[in-house]
Amino acid sequence: MKKRSLKLRPFPWKCRTCGKQAVTRAVVTYETEREHDGRSYAIVVPYLEVFECGECHARLLSDESREKVTDALRTKAGLLTPKEIREYRRGLSLTQEQLANCLRVAKETVSRWETGGQIQQRAMDLLLRLFFGPPSVRAALAGELENESYQGWIDVVDQEVQNQPQKATPLGQPS
Ligand SMILES: [Zn+2]
């Protein structure tokens, strides 16, 4: 509960944009444009609490409101939510580290997806959905299959994976 002292100051606050003492709390239909993974999304969040300047209309968001906007972006982009990622992973009795190893990402990356600190890229979202789907995909990604027909596919996945740990892959090299 840090940074909450900011909220306790009486309104109106001084605007950081125009310098006028005109910032108050407001509940608005918040419309914004957000970039994610090279695409632009028009986001609308109804009933969002903001701090708005009555003079220049500059807006500030609390952490909580910022999170609501991020949730709306995730929904708009059709990406798995942090809760879904966490529940699917737990459903397979995997630790964050085990999932991270299978997907060739850092454990911290999985942790950030699950806490909402980072939104996964579309390719990673697709990989997550594949991983949580057919057992054969999980087996291939877990490196349990020696079958060479999987090797080409795994190489493609490897190239798409962002933030790869610098560790050597346990999979053999294609001949
Ligand atoms: Zn202002």
Image (cartoon, rainbow, N blue to C red):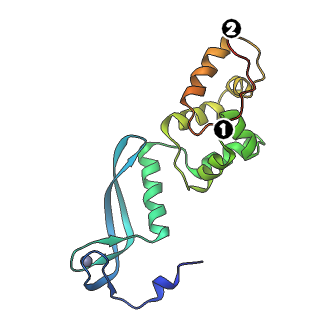
On the image, the x and y values in percent for residue 165 come to: 66, 38
Q: Compare residues 63 and 29 and report the one nearer the observer.
A: 63
Mark 1 CB near ligand 1 (8 Å cut) = no
Residue 80 image label: none
Image quadrant of ligand 1? bottom left
Residue ranking furthest to the bottom: 10
Which SS class for mark 2? loop
Residue 125, placed above or below residue 145: below
| For residue 71, side relative to residue 42 (left or right) | right
Residue denoted by label 1: 165
Which SS class for mark 1? loop
Crowding near the residue tagged with mark 1, few <14, some 14–19, many ≥20 C-alpha atoms within 10 Å:
some
Residue 175 image label: 2
- Residue at the location (46% across, 83% down)? 7
Residue 115, placed above or below residue 23: above
Query: Which quarter shows the N terminus?
Result: bottom right
Q: Amino acid at mark 1?
A: Pro
Dividing the picture into quadrants, the one containing residue 43 is: bottom left
**Which tag, 1 or 2, sits closer to the chain's start?**
1
Q: Compare residues 124 and 160 and report the one nearer the observer.
A: 160
Dividing the picture into quadrants, the one containing residue 9 is: bottom left
Q: Compare residues 47 and 82 and report the one nearer the observer.
A: 82
On the image, the x and y values in percent for residue 105 come to: 64, 39
On the image, the x and y values in percent for residue 123 come to: 51, 33
| For residue 37, side relative to residue 135 (left or right) | left
Dividing the picture into quadrants, the one containing residue 166 is: top right
- Residue at the location (21% across, 75% down)? 56
Q: CA distance from mark 1 to mark 2?
A: 24 Å
- Residue at the location (43% across, 41% down)? 37
- Residue at the location (76% across, 42% down)? 94
On the image, the x and y values in percent for residue 172 come to: 74, 18
Q: Amino acid at mark 2?
A: Ser
